Amino acid sequence: MLSRRASLRSAIAALGVGAALALSAGTPAFAANEGDHWLNTPNCTADQKIELHLYNGVYHDAQAIDPTYVNGSCEFVLTDNGSVIYDSTKSSQSPWYYDGPGHTICAKVTEYNYNGRGTNYTANGVCN
């Protein structure tokens, strides 16, 4: 039978091994911006979606823009490090884009010629 001291040492060793395993496992990169971010103009609305997706065995952020209301001349854009990666006037969701290390994806909704007066409205989403 193990003494109390030996039992305590065994428990501490087991916790140490468990902690080492937990820290060495591939853990997801959680971002503060994950979730749904709504972009609104008077006649255009889109959901900027940021979720964790599995890429090559590791979880990283991915982004998509999903137009939910289109009642005008609307443009839905995603950029990555300032370059346009998605640009559409359609009311269907974009593909998912990898948003891991080295990428900064931003979303934008623009409504052109609101009420026929030449006024444009722009809603900027988060950059992640």
Image (spheres, helix red, strand yellow):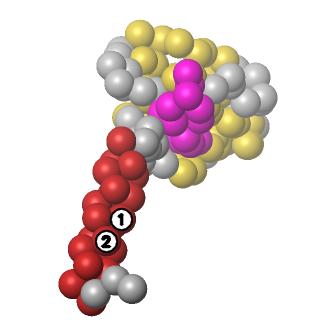
Tell me the residue at 24%/74% (across/down): 9
State whether residue 73 is above or below residue 53.
above
User: Where is residue 10 drawn, in percent x and y?
Assistant: 31, 71
Q: Residue at x 66, y 18 (%)?
A: 88
Regarding residue 38, the answer to whether it shows in the image is no
| Number of marks in the rendered image | 2
Q: Are marks 1 and 2 in contact (CB under 8 Å)?
A: yes
Three-letter amino acid code of the residue under disc 1: Ala
Please say if 37 is above or below 3. above
The quarter holding residue 81 reads: top left
Which stretch appears magenta? Answer: 49-60
Position of residue 6 measured from the top left corner of the image (x, y, whole percent): 26, 79
Instruction: Between residue 45 and residue 7, name the one nearer to us.
Output: 7
| Res. 48 image quadrant | top right
The residue tagged 1 is 14
User: Does 51 sit above or below residue 94?
Assistant: below
Residue 34: x percent and y percent? 48, 48
Indicate yes or no whether the magenta region holds residue 116: no
* Pointer 2 residue: 10
Q: Residue at x 48, y 12 (%)?
A: 84
The residue nearer to you, when weighing 13 against 62, is 13
Q: CA distance from mark 1 to mark 2?
A: 6 Å
Quarter of the image with the C terminus is top left
Q: Position of residue 92 (x, y in %)?
A: 78, 29
Which residue shows up at 75% across the image and 23% down it?
90
Please give left or right for residue 53 compared with residue 7 in the image.
Answer: right
Q: Which secondary structure lies at badge 2?
A: helix
58 or 92: nearer the viewer: 58
